Amino acid sequence: MFEIDVRALRDGRLFLSRTLVRGDETGEISHAEEEALRQEIATLSHKLITIKTEDVSSLSELRQQIQDAFRLVSLGLEYGSNGDLDRSVRLLKNNRVVKFFQIGNTLADELVERCRDILENAVLISPECASPARNNIDAILVYNDWERQFLGAINEFKLIIESPQVTLRGVASSRPITNLMDLAVVRQQLDNLDYRLAYIRALPIEKVLDAEYRSNADNDSAREITIALMVNLVLYHEVDFHLDPNDLRSLRDIAYDSESGEIRSDCRGRLIDWIKRYLDLAESPDQVKNYAVAYWQETLKILESEFIL
Protein backbone atom coordinates (compact mmCIF):
# COMPACT_ATOMS: atom_id res chain seq x y z
CA MET A 1 0.00 0.00 0.00
CA PHE A 2 2.99 2.33 0.39
CA GLU A 3 3.45 2.39 -3.38
CA ILE A 4 0.49 4.77 -3.66
CA ASP A 5 2.74 7.64 -2.60
CA VAL A 6 6.12 6.78 -4.03
CA ARG A 7 5.71 10.05 -5.95
CA ALA A 8 6.02 11.89 -2.63
CA LEU A 9 9.79 11.44 -2.87
CA ARG A 10 9.70 13.67 -5.93
CA ASP A 11 7.27 16.26 -4.54
CA GLY A 12 9.01 19.52 -5.40
CA ARG A 13 7.52 21.28 -2.37
CA LEU A 14 9.57 19.11 -0.02
CA PHE A 15 13.16 19.81 0.95
CA LEU A 16 13.65 16.04 0.91
CA SER A 17 12.80 15.98 -2.77
CA ARG A 18 15.26 18.77 -3.58
CA THR A 19 17.93 16.93 -1.60
CA LEU A 20 17.41 13.80 -3.67
CA VAL A 21 17.60 15.79 -6.88
CA ARG A 22 20.89 17.33 -5.70
CA GLY A 23 22.21 13.92 -4.66
CA ASP A 24 21.27 12.52 -8.08
CA GLU A 25 22.96 15.44 -9.86
CA THR A 26 26.20 15.01 -7.90
CA GLY A 27 26.09 11.22 -8.04
CA GLU A 28 26.16 10.97 -4.23
CA ILE A 29 22.77 9.25 -3.94
CA SER A 30 22.15 6.23 -6.12
CA HIS A 31 18.78 4.87 -7.21
CA ALA A 32 19.33 1.94 -4.87
CA GLU A 33 19.91 4.32 -1.95
CA GLU A 34 16.79 6.26 -2.87
CA GLU A 35 14.79 3.03 -2.89
CA ALA A 36 16.20 2.11 0.53
CA LEU A 37 15.18 5.55 1.76
CA ARG A 38 11.65 5.01 0.49
CA GLN A 39 11.45 1.71 2.34
CA GLU A 40 12.59 3.33 5.57
CA ILE A 41 9.89 5.99 5.26
CA ALA A 42 7.38 3.25 4.49
CA THR A 43 8.27 1.63 7.79
CA LEU A 44 7.78 4.94 9.59
CA SER A 45 4.44 5.37 7.80
CA HIS A 46 3.32 1.98 9.03
CA LYS A 47 4.02 3.07 12.61
CA LEU A 48 2.02 6.26 12.10
CA ILE A 49 -0.85 4.26 10.60
CA THR A 50 -0.81 1.88 13.57
CA ILE A 51 -0.90 4.75 16.07
CA LYS A 52 -3.13 7.33 14.39
CA THR A 53 -5.40 5.68 11.83
CA GLU A 54 -8.88 4.83 13.04
CA ASP A 55 -10.00 3.05 9.87
CA VAL A 56 -7.20 1.06 8.21
CA SER A 57 -9.52 0.37 5.28
CA SER A 58 -9.70 4.10 4.48
CA LEU A 59 -7.36 4.87 1.60
CA SER A 60 -7.46 8.59 2.39
CA GLU A 61 -6.38 8.02 6.00
CA LEU A 62 -3.56 5.74 4.90
CA ARG A 63 -2.40 8.26 2.33
CA GLN A 64 -2.51 11.02 4.95
CA GLN A 65 -0.17 9.15 7.31
CA ILE A 66 2.21 8.28 4.48
CA GLN A 67 2.34 11.89 3.35
CA ASP A 68 2.85 13.02 6.95
CA ALA A 69 5.82 10.68 7.27
CA PHE A 70 7.42 12.18 4.16
CA ARG A 71 6.73 15.73 5.36
CA LEU A 72 8.15 15.14 8.85
CA VAL A 73 11.30 13.53 7.48
CA SER A 74 11.70 16.43 5.04
CA LEU A 75 11.15 19.02 7.76
CA GLY A 76 13.67 17.36 10.08
CA LEU A 77 16.22 17.15 7.27
CA GLU A 78 15.77 20.82 6.37
CA TYR A 79 16.11 21.79 10.04
CA GLY A 80 19.20 19.61 10.55
CA SER A 81 20.94 20.94 7.45
CA ASN A 82 19.77 24.53 7.96
CA GLY A 83 18.46 24.47 4.41
CA ASP A 84 21.85 23.70 2.83
CA LEU A 85 21.28 21.13 0.07
CA ASP A 86 24.87 19.88 -0.09
CA ARG A 87 24.98 19.39 3.65
CA SER A 88 21.54 17.77 3.46
CA VAL A 89 22.84 15.18 0.96
CA ARG A 90 25.68 14.28 3.32
CA LEU A 91 23.36 14.05 6.31
CA LEU A 92 20.95 11.82 4.42
CA LYS A 93 23.74 9.44 3.40
CA ASN A 94 25.29 9.24 6.87
CA ASN A 95 22.22 9.02 9.13
CA ARG A 96 19.15 6.86 9.47
CA VAL A 97 15.94 8.43 8.21
CA VAL A 98 14.29 7.94 11.59
CA LYS A 99 16.58 10.63 13.03
CA PHE A 100 15.12 13.28 10.73
CA PHE A 101 11.62 11.97 11.33
CA GLN A 102 12.13 12.44 15.07
CA ILE A 103 13.36 16.00 14.56
CA GLY A 104 10.39 16.84 12.33
CA ASN A 105 7.97 15.20 14.73
CA THR A 106 9.40 17.19 17.64
CA LEU A 107 8.98 20.44 15.70
CA ALA A 108 5.38 19.49 14.91
CA ASP A 109 4.62 18.52 18.52
CA GLU A 110 6.05 21.81 19.81
CA LEU A 111 3.79 23.82 17.51
CA VAL A 112 0.71 21.78 18.38
CA GLU A 113 1.39 22.10 22.10
CA ARG A 114 1.85 25.85 21.83
CA CYS A 115 -1.42 26.18 19.91
CA ARG A 116 -3.29 24.18 22.51
CA ASP A 117 -1.84 26.37 25.24
CA ILE A 118 -3.05 29.54 23.48
CA LEU A 119 -6.51 28.06 22.89
CA GLU A 120 -6.74 27.24 26.58
CA ASN A 121 -5.04 30.22 28.18
CA ALA A 122 -5.42 33.26 25.88
CA VAL A 123 -8.41 34.21 27.99
CA LEU A 124 -9.16 37.10 30.33
CA ILE A 125 -10.82 36.02 33.55
CA SER A 126 -11.73 37.64 36.81
CA PRO A 127 -8.95 37.33 39.43
CA GLU A 128 -11.47 35.54 41.65
CA CYS A 129 -11.69 32.64 39.19
CA ALA A 130 -9.32 29.76 39.76
CA SER A 131 -9.09 28.73 36.11
CA PRO A 132 -10.21 30.00 32.68
CA ALA A 133 -13.23 27.73 32.43
CA ARG A 134 -14.79 27.98 29.00
CA ASN A 135 -18.29 28.38 30.40
CA ASN A 136 -17.27 31.21 32.71
CA ILE A 137 -19.38 34.24 31.82
CA ASP A 138 -16.52 36.49 32.96
CA ALA A 139 -14.07 34.95 30.50
CA ILE A 140 -13.09 36.92 27.38
CA LEU A 141 -11.21 35.20 24.56
CA VAL A 142 -8.30 37.23 23.20
CA TYR A 143 -8.33 35.48 19.81
CA ASN A 144 -11.10 35.83 17.24
CA ASP A 145 -12.93 33.23 15.14
CA TRP A 146 -10.39 33.38 12.30
CA GLU A 147 -7.56 32.85 14.75
CA ARG A 148 -9.43 29.97 16.36
CA GLN A 149 -9.54 28.36 12.89
CA PHE A 150 -5.83 29.02 12.45
CA LEU A 151 -5.02 27.40 15.79
CA GLY A 152 -7.26 24.45 15.02
CA ALA A 153 -5.54 23.89 11.67
CA ILE A 154 -2.13 23.83 13.36
CA ASN A 155 -3.43 21.01 15.57
CA GLU A 156 -3.70 19.03 12.32
CA PHE A 157 -0.29 20.37 11.17
CA LYS A 158 -1.93 22.44 8.45
CA LEU A 159 -1.66 26.11 7.56
CA ILE A 160 -4.46 28.46 6.49
CA ILE A 161 -2.53 31.73 6.18
CA GLU A 162 0.19 32.74 3.73
CA SER A 163 1.99 35.27 5.94
CA PRO A 164 1.84 36.57 9.53
CA GLN A 165 -0.69 39.32 10.24
CA VAL A 166 -1.26 41.69 13.14
CA THR A 167 -4.69 40.12 13.50
CA LEU A 168 -6.40 37.59 11.27
CA ARG A 169 -9.47 38.80 9.45
CA GLY A 170 -9.67 35.96 6.96
CA VAL A 171 -7.92 32.72 6.05
CA ALA A 172 -6.73 30.94 2.92
CA SER A 173 -7.30 27.37 1.77
CA SER A 174 -5.86 24.72 4.06
CA ARG A 175 -2.53 23.20 3.07
CA PRO A 176 0.03 21.01 4.86
CA ILE A 177 2.98 22.54 6.69
CA THR A 178 5.95 21.36 4.64
CA ASN A 179 9.02 23.52 5.30
CA LEU A 180 10.84 25.83 7.68
CA MET A 181 9.29 28.90 6.06
CA ASP A 182 5.87 27.58 7.00
CA LEU A 183 7.11 27.08 10.57
CA ALA A 184 8.36 30.67 10.64
CA VAL A 185 4.92 31.94 9.53
CA VAL A 186 3.20 29.90 12.25
CA ARG A 187 5.60 30.97 14.97
CA GLN A 188 5.27 34.67 14.12
CA GLN A 189 1.49 34.43 14.15
CA LEU A 190 1.61 32.65 17.51
CA ASP A 191 3.99 35.33 18.80
CA ASN A 192 1.47 37.97 17.70
CA LEU A 193 -1.26 36.25 19.69
CA ASP A 194 1.01 36.08 22.73
CA TYR A 195 1.89 39.77 22.39
CA ARG A 196 -1.79 40.69 22.12
CA LEU A 197 -2.57 38.71 25.24
CA ALA A 198 0.24 40.47 27.11
CA TYR A 199 -1.01 43.88 25.91
CA ILE A 200 -4.61 43.20 26.92
CA ARG A 201 -3.55 41.80 30.30
CA ALA A 202 -1.55 44.98 30.93
CA LEU A 203 -4.85 46.93 30.93
CA PRO A 204 -6.85 47.27 34.19
CA ILE A 205 -8.51 43.87 34.10
CA GLU A 206 -11.35 44.66 36.50
CA LYS A 207 -12.45 47.59 34.31
CA VAL A 208 -12.11 45.46 31.19
CA LEU A 209 -14.25 42.68 32.62
CA ASP A 210 -16.81 45.08 34.05
CA ALA A 211 -17.78 46.54 30.67
CA GLU A 212 -20.05 45.21 27.94
CA TYR A 213 -18.79 45.23 24.36
CA ARG A 214 -20.30 45.45 20.92
CA SER A 215 -20.61 42.22 18.98
CA ASN A 216 -18.87 41.85 15.63
CA ALA A 217 -18.86 39.32 12.81
CA ASP A 218 -15.68 37.51 13.84
CA ASN A 219 -16.22 37.58 17.63
CA ASP A 220 -13.16 39.76 18.15
CA SER A 221 -13.43 40.91 21.77
CA ALA A 222 -9.88 42.25 21.92
CA ARG A 223 -10.67 44.66 19.10
CA GLU A 224 -13.80 45.92 20.86
CA ILE A 225 -11.88 46.36 24.10
CA THR A 226 -9.34 48.47 22.23
CA ILE A 227 -12.00 50.53 20.45
CA ALA A 228 -13.80 51.19 23.75
CA LEU A 229 -10.57 52.35 25.35
CA MET A 230 -9.77 54.64 22.40
CA VAL A 231 -13.22 56.22 22.54
CA ASN A 232 -12.96 56.91 26.26
CA LEU A 233 -9.48 58.38 25.89
CA VAL A 234 -10.59 60.77 23.15
CA LEU A 235 -14.01 61.77 24.53
CA TYR A 236 -13.49 61.62 28.28
CA HIS A 237 -9.69 61.58 28.74
CA GLU A 238 -9.88 58.56 31.02
CA VAL A 239 -9.06 54.87 31.00
CA ASP A 240 -12.45 53.22 30.79
CA PHE A 241 -14.23 50.69 28.59
CA HIS A 242 -17.92 51.56 28.85
CA LEU A 243 -19.53 52.90 25.67
CA ASP A 244 -22.72 54.94 25.63
CA PRO A 245 -24.93 54.50 22.55
CA ASN A 246 -23.79 57.79 20.97
CA ASP A 247 -20.08 57.59 21.82
CA LEU A 248 -18.95 56.24 18.46
CA ARG A 249 -20.93 58.94 16.67
CA SER A 250 -19.30 61.56 18.88
CA LEU A 251 -15.87 60.12 18.12
CA ARG A 252 -16.64 60.31 14.43
CA ASP A 253 -17.63 63.97 14.72
CA ILE A 254 -14.50 64.85 16.68
CA ALA A 255 -11.78 62.68 15.16
CA TYR A 256 -12.79 61.71 11.62
CA ASP A 257 -11.98 63.69 8.48
CA SER A 258 -14.62 62.75 5.91
CA GLU A 259 -12.64 64.29 3.04
CA SER A 260 -9.57 62.09 3.55
CA GLY A 261 -11.54 59.14 4.94
CA GLU A 262 -9.12 58.93 7.85
CA ILE A 263 -8.98 59.70 11.55
CA ARG A 264 -7.20 63.01 11.96
CA SER A 265 -3.46 62.70 12.38
CA ASP A 266 -3.35 64.67 15.65
CA CYS A 267 -5.91 62.36 17.25
CA ARG A 268 -4.19 59.28 15.86
CA GLY A 269 -0.84 60.50 17.17
CA ARG A 270 -2.19 61.15 20.67
CA LEU A 271 -3.69 57.66 20.86
CA ILE A 272 -0.53 55.94 19.67
CA ASP A 273 1.59 58.01 22.06
CA TRP A 274 -0.75 57.06 24.90
CA ILE A 275 -0.43 53.30 24.42
CA LYS A 276 3.35 53.63 24.09
CA ARG A 277 3.58 55.52 27.38
CA TYR A 278 1.12 53.22 29.12
CA LEU A 279 3.07 50.07 28.22
CA ASP A 280 6.34 51.80 29.13
CA LEU A 281 4.94 52.42 32.61
CA ALA A 282 3.74 48.81 32.73
CA GLU A 283 7.33 47.76 31.87
CA SER A 284 6.08 45.65 28.97
CA PRO A 285 8.76 44.10 26.71
CA ASP A 286 9.62 45.94 23.52
CA GLN A 287 8.03 43.19 21.40
CA VAL A 288 4.72 43.70 23.19
CA LYS A 289 4.91 47.48 22.83
CA ASN A 290 5.75 47.28 19.14
CA TYR A 291 2.93 44.82 18.54
CA ALA A 292 0.43 46.92 20.51
CA VAL A 293 1.28 49.99 18.41
CA ALA A 294 0.72 48.01 15.21
CA TYR A 295 -2.51 46.61 16.68
CA TRP A 296 -3.81 50.09 17.55
CA GLN A 297 -2.94 51.35 14.08
CA GLU A 298 -4.86 48.49 12.52
CA THR A 299 -7.79 49.05 14.87
CA LEU A 300 -7.90 52.71 13.83
CA LYS A 301 -8.14 51.59 10.20
CA ILE A 302 -11.07 49.36 11.12
CA LEU A 303 -12.75 52.32 12.80
CA GLU A 304 -12.20 54.38 9.65
CA SER A 305 -13.90 51.71 7.58
CA GLU A 306 -16.86 51.77 9.98
CA PHE A 307 -17.12 55.57 9.73
CA ILE A 308 -17.29 55.39 5.93
CA LEU A 309 -20.40 53.20 6.09
Image (tube, rainbow, N blue to C red):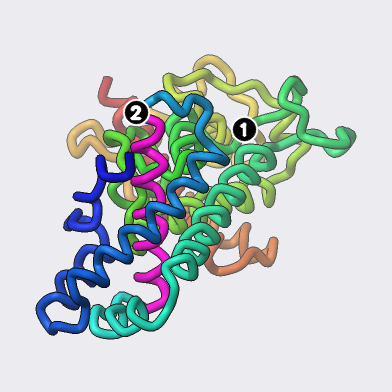
- Front position in the image: 274 or 61: 61
Name the kind of residue labelled 2 in the image. Leu
Q: Is residue 37 above or below residue 118?
A: below
Residue situated furthest front in the rendering = 32
Q: Is residue 149 above or below residue 272?
A: above
Residue 172 spot, x, y in % from top left = 28, 36
Using the rendered image of the protein, determine whether residue 263 is visible from the camera's viewpoint: no
Q: Mostly what secondary structure, the magenta segment?
A: helix
Looking at marks 2 and 1 on the same chain, the residue that comes earlier in the sequence is marked by 2
Residue lying at 89% horizontally and 34% vertically, measured from the top left: 128
Compared across the picture, whether 111 is left or right of 22 comes to: right
Residue 46 spot, x, y in % from top left = 46, 46
Quadrant position of the C terminus in the picture = top left
Residue lying at 56% horizontally and 45% vertically, measured from the top left: 115
* Mark 1 neighbour class, 10 Å CA radius: few under 14, some 14 to 19, many 20 or more: many
Residue 40 spot, x, y in % from top left = 39, 61
Residue lying at 55% horizontally and 36% vertically, measured from the top left: 222
- Region of the chain picked out in magenta, as a range: 61-82
- Label 1: which residue? 141
Name the kind of residue labelled 1 in the image. Leu
Residue 217 spot, x, y in % from top left = 42, 19
Q: Secondary structure at mark 1?
A: strand
Say which mark, if any, is on residue 59: 2
Using the rendered image of the protein, determine whether residue 4 is visible from the camera's viewpoint: yes
- Front position in the image: 127 or 34: 34
Taking the magenta stretch, the answer to whether it contains residue 80 is yes
Q: In which quarter of the view is residue 140 placed?
A: top right
Which label lies toward us, 2 or 1? 2
Taking the magenta stretch, the answer to whether it contains residue 22 is no
